[in-house]
Amino acid sequence: AQSVTQLDSHVSVSEGTPVLLRCNYSSSYSPSLFWYVQHPNKGLQLLLKYTSAATLVKGINGFEAEFKKSETSFHLTKPSAHMSDAAEYFCVVSVSGYALNFGKGTSLLVTP
Amino acid sequence: DSGVTQTPKHLITATGQRVTLRCSPRSGDLSVYWYQQSLDQGLQFLIQYYNGEERAKGNILERFSAQQFPDLHSELNLSSLELGDSALYFCASSTVPGTGGTDTQYFGPGTRLTVL
């Protein structure tokens, strides 16, 4: 079954420093992977998606993720954190082309 | 703004009651998905409709049901409500029913249900 594991439930960074949110996936075939962000009391917004076209995926707001098959990972990174990046981030895998299977989420805290 | 609308934003009701949550997909999207977000279970897929027909079911309780109407809006009906049904319910839509898993789902702002 397709699933994802987010390795950190909370990550704290200082403004201006790099962000790394870790995600490992489990899939019996080439997966479709996504990162979504949820700001407090808001809906879910798509940051980026991987669909096997390129292993390095660029998303919105300066985020990017690299698909590493050998490590079964899809970590989310950003070179420099901004206060507005504070939110809950979800790593997601598409299940059989319809349902999305969400990780438990990583709460990103950005301190001044 | 994703283009997916959900009403109401908040709903407070009592145990044993029945409620209906409404979702309007993005213009042109034929697929609608429902998800439940709770503190203990996280985000879980409930059900998917495509052009009026049920396409896939996830962890949806028998007390819950959904439908998609000819104008493509969808309703999620929750009956015999229990305290544990308190959660944030999201609707998402996509253009096609997930061909190859590459189709992007766009999420609405959610309906927060509180069962007292």
Image (tube, rainbow, N blue to C red):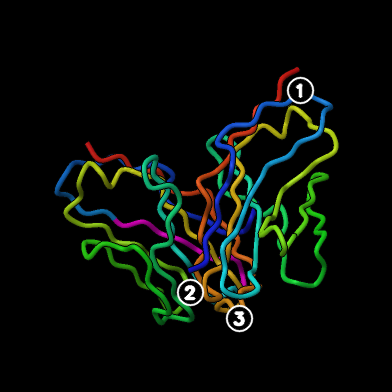
Is residue B113 depicted above or below A57 in this figure? above
Kind of residue indicated by mark 2:
Leu
- Residues rendered magenta in the picture: B20-28
Instruction: Look at discs 2 and 3 and give the one toward the viewer.
Output: 3
The reply to whether dot 1 and dot 3 touch (C-beta < 8 Å) is no
Instruction: Name the chain letter of the residue that bears numbered label 3.
Output: B
Kind of residue indicated by mark 3:
Thr
Residue B85 at what x, y percent from top left? 28, 47
Decide whether residue B74 is among the magenta residues.
Answer: no
Instruction: Name the chain letter of the residue that bears numbered label 2.
Output: B
Q: Secondary structure at mark 3?
A: helix
The residue singled out by tag 1 in the image is A14
Q: Are marks 2 and 3 on the same chain?
A: yes
Left/right of residue B69 with respect to residue A41 in the rendered view: left
Instruction: Name the chain letter of the residue that bears numbered label 1.
Output: A
Q: Quadrant of residue B30?
A: bottom right
Is residue B50 depicted above or below A18 in this figure? below
The residue singled out by tag 2 in the image is B72
